Image (spheres, grey):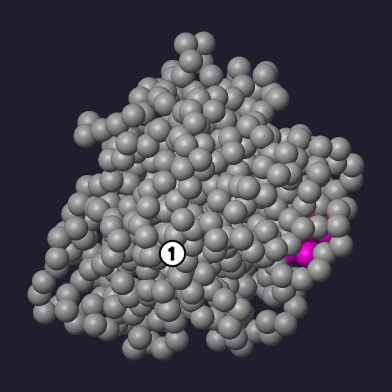
Amino acid sequence: MFDLRTVNDVLVRATGRGDRTVLMVQEEAGRWSPISSVDLYGRVRALADVLRSWGVEKGDRVALLAENRWEWPVTDFAVLALGGVDVPLYPTLTTEQIGYMLRDSGAKVAFVSTAEQYQKVRQAGELPDLKVVVVMDPGENEGAESFSNLMKEAPEKQQRDAAFDVMLKTARPEDLATIIYTSGTTGEPKGVMLTHGNLASNLNYSTGPLGLGDKDTGISFLPLSHVTARHLDYALMCHGTKVAYCAKFDQLPEAMRVVRPTIFVAVPRVYEKIRQAVEAKSAQSPLKHRIFQWALKVGKAHRAEILEGKKVGGTSWAIANKLVFSKIADAFGGEVRIFIAGGAPLGVDTAGWFADAGISILEGYGLTETSPVIALNYPGVNRIGTVGRPLENVQCRFADDGELEVKGPSIFVGYWKKERETKEAFAEDGWFRTGDIGNLDEQGFLSITDRKKELLKTSGGKLIAPQPIENKLKANTLVGNAALVGDKHKFACVLISPNLVALKGWAGGQGLQAGDLTTLVRNPKVIQAYQQIVDRVNQELAHFESIKRICVVPDEWSVETDELTPSLKLKRRIVEKKYEKQIADFYADEATAKG
């Protein structure tokens, strides 16, 4: 447990370690370079001096539009050192979305990663409050400042400066630290206001039991615009753990091979993709498949020991580990001892599969509005199907309809310039309404079943939680993503976005031409294969939950095509709008169809 009062205290801890490496950066040539504690201090101090010369003062907003790179935390810490408020924006946002958020927040300065992001800002319309734009990448960008030029005096500012250190301590827990815009899965984005105290109180309790230290390394690849990734980086810095920045997801496999992290935190979709890749590889030959299935059977017999963090012995385990499990561990770099999943439900199937392969994934749960962690499983105290026990500083209760409500110092203070939405987010006695349906078991483990707004209510009055069903479908290699529909209808149906690599490989094995995707997904053999996947899932569902009709769409959903949020959650409204015709076809004969 830490004793942090503000985020500035994180900087003090991270920069108090002399020449020891705190950050690792991948250069263009692929070489990883260290940034020491004193390097970080000099760069933050230099940038803070520049920002002050531009008139940035307490309460001023500064936008950050960049991938994960060392300039991100330097900017973050420099803004907070001055009492400013940073506004992180996802690099995947459109020009229109960026314009809205810059205007809404009233950002005075914007830091962007590349010339491409700079052009988005330039084309975002009138931005009356924006005075300066800084580009992190080297090169000339007309009308913008160069980040490298702002760092020229950094080497001279590595010595501790009394005035700067005093300024860091003037921040108060109640001071606003950041405005984080929600990804807008259910409507217009809202700016979540988090104070220094909100963020610090969560850091004090969330990661202590993980046992991290200065021998550990983590890779920062989840978008820092998301509070979970930012919280993790802060926590690693406090523990003295090295943070390696990976700017692009497609660089992650190579980064894991070289960096060999000891802690790995990802959204469930990352784990699902790794599982699918492993299963696809094992299916390349009947012998590989038999060995793989045998190994998982051996692992399943030891699942309880894995989840309790015990060392498994025995000849069968040793053979299974050598032939299969070690290969899966190598996909993460081979040294990871702590696996964490958050941002969306992991799914019992996926969690169990990894446990059977010797990997205990610690699932956690939280929201942007809760800074973010509400609950987390820990090594040796890991219960599949739950998100762990709530943190010590978070109180939980349930409304009559099962919605989880929470209270504590990590709960946000409101939505930026949205009084009505802020009022609606809290119960009359001040408890925050999470919007999630859940329960606590007798041992105090929290389970989240679904988003309250995403529950489907059939015309017969039955409630269906779509996420657990979708997770079961996504456990199959051929399924990239799935969206259950059926609200106000007699029965549920599903839209399936295929895993294109797996589907094309399967099609080749069936002698089918995989060139035109639209033609491929309409092939009777392909439809039958997906129907069989749905049929197997239906066997595990109640009658009213069972999926009556399917449609395999000729699209692989992604952040770029707007079906997924930057944290890889499904944008249901977007999907339902995009596939209106397919959904209408599901229910064209609903009146006479069997329920």
Q: Is residue 400 left or right of residue 26?
A: left
Q: Is residue 425 visible?
A: yes
Q: Give the quadrant of residue 496.
A: bottom right
The verdict on residue 537 being magenta is no
The residue at 55%/52% (across/down) is 44
For this rendering, which residue is in front, 262 or 543?
Answer: 262
In the rendered image, the quadrant that contains the C terminus is top right
Q: Percent x, y for residue 161?
A: 48, 47
For this rendering, which residue is in front, 538 or 465?
Answer: 465
The residue at 70%/25% (across/down) is 417
Q: Is residue 436 left or right of residue 379?
A: right
For this rendering, which residue is in front, 63 or 325?
Answer: 63
Q: Is residue 68 visible?
A: no
Q: Give the quadrant of residue 352.
A: bottom left
The residue at 48%/15% (across/down) is 430
The amino acid type of the residue labelled 1 equals Ser
Q: Is residue 308 left or right of residue 488?
A: left
Callout 1 secondary element: strand
Q: Percent x, y for residue 216?
A: 32, 63
Which stretch did the figure color magenta? 113-120
Magenta span: predominant SS is helix
User: Dot 1, how many residues are within 10 Å of its Cα: few (below 14), some (14-19), or many (20+)?
Assistant: many
Q: Percent x, y for residue 178?
A: 59, 37
Q: Percent x, y for residue 297?
A: 24, 70
Residue topped by disc 1:
36
Vertical relation: 285 (above or below) 98: below
The residue at 21%/34% (across/down) is 443
The verdict on residue 118 being magenta is yes
